[in-house]
Amino acid sequence: MIEIIEGNLLDATEDIIVQQVNCQGVMGSGLAKQIRAKHPEVYKWYQAYCDGQNPHDLLGKMQAVLVEHAEYSYVVNIFGQLNYGRQDVLYTDYEALKQGLVKLKDSAKELGLSVALPYNIGCGLANGDWDIVVYPMIKLIFQDYNVTIYKYNG
C-alpha cells in the first residue's frame, strides 16, 4: 500500500529513507545536498562506493548507509542516473531506478523495515516523468509492501 503524506523526508520516522543518486560521486544539489549536509557519512560512503568503479556498472544498484541522530536508521542511495546536470534532458534511467526500487523493496521486506520515498523521486533535477512513468512504477513494485511517500511543500 502506498500512502502519500505532506512533510519533509528528512523528518521521516520510517526505518529507511531513499534518494536517487548519480553514478559520478556528486551530491551537489536537491535532496542529495540536503542529505549530505545532515548526514556527511552518507556522502563519504557514497563517494567510496563510486571510487574505482565504472559508473555504468553502478546503474541499478542500491547502497544502504546506517545513520545516527535521526528517527530513521538508513539512507538508501539508488543509482538511478548515470550523470547529472541542469540541461533539459532526461537524466533518470528508468530501468536502473526500477532495479534499485525492486532491490530496496526485497531487502526491506526481508528485514521487516519500513520505507519512505520522496515524492517525485527521479523527477526533479533528473527530469523523470512522475505521473506517466515513476509513480506507476512505484505502485507496481510496492503493491505488496507498504511505502510512505513524503511530499515536501517547502
Image (spheres, rainbow, N blue to C red):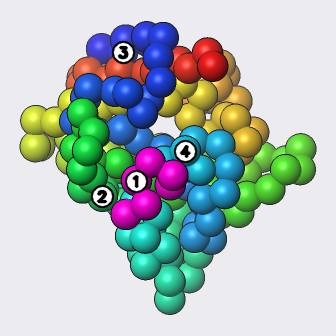
Q: Which mark is residue 59?
A: none
Compared to 20, does 23 lie above or below?
A: below
Residue bearing mark 1: 39
Determine the residue located farthest toward the left in the rendered image.
Answer: 111
Quarter occupied by the C terminus: top right
Residue type for callout 4 = Gln
Name the residue rendered at 49%, 73% in the picture: 47
Residue under pointer 4: 34
Where disc 1 sits, the SS reads: loop
- Which residues are drawn in magenta? 36-41
Q: Position of residue 24 (x, y in %)?
A: 62, 71
Q: Is residue 37 left or right of residue 39?
A: right
Q: Nearer the viewer, mark 2 or mark 1?
A: 1
| Amino acid under disc 1 | His
Amino acid beneath label 3: Ile
Which numbered disc, 4 or 1, marks the residue that appears first in the sequence? 4
- Marks 4 and 3, the one that precedes in the sequence: 3
- What is the magenta segment's predominant secondary structure? helix
**Mark 4 vs mark 1, CA separation in Å:** 8 Å
Return the residue at label 2: 65
Horizontal side of 14 relative to 151 (left or right) equals left
* Image position, residue 69 (x, y; %): 26, 44
Which quadrant holds residue 16?
top left
Residue 2: give its label.
Answer: 3
Crowding around mark 3 (Cα neighbors within 10 Å: few <14, some 14 to 19, many 20+) is some
Element on which disc 3 rests: strand
Residue type of the residue flagged with mark 2:
Val
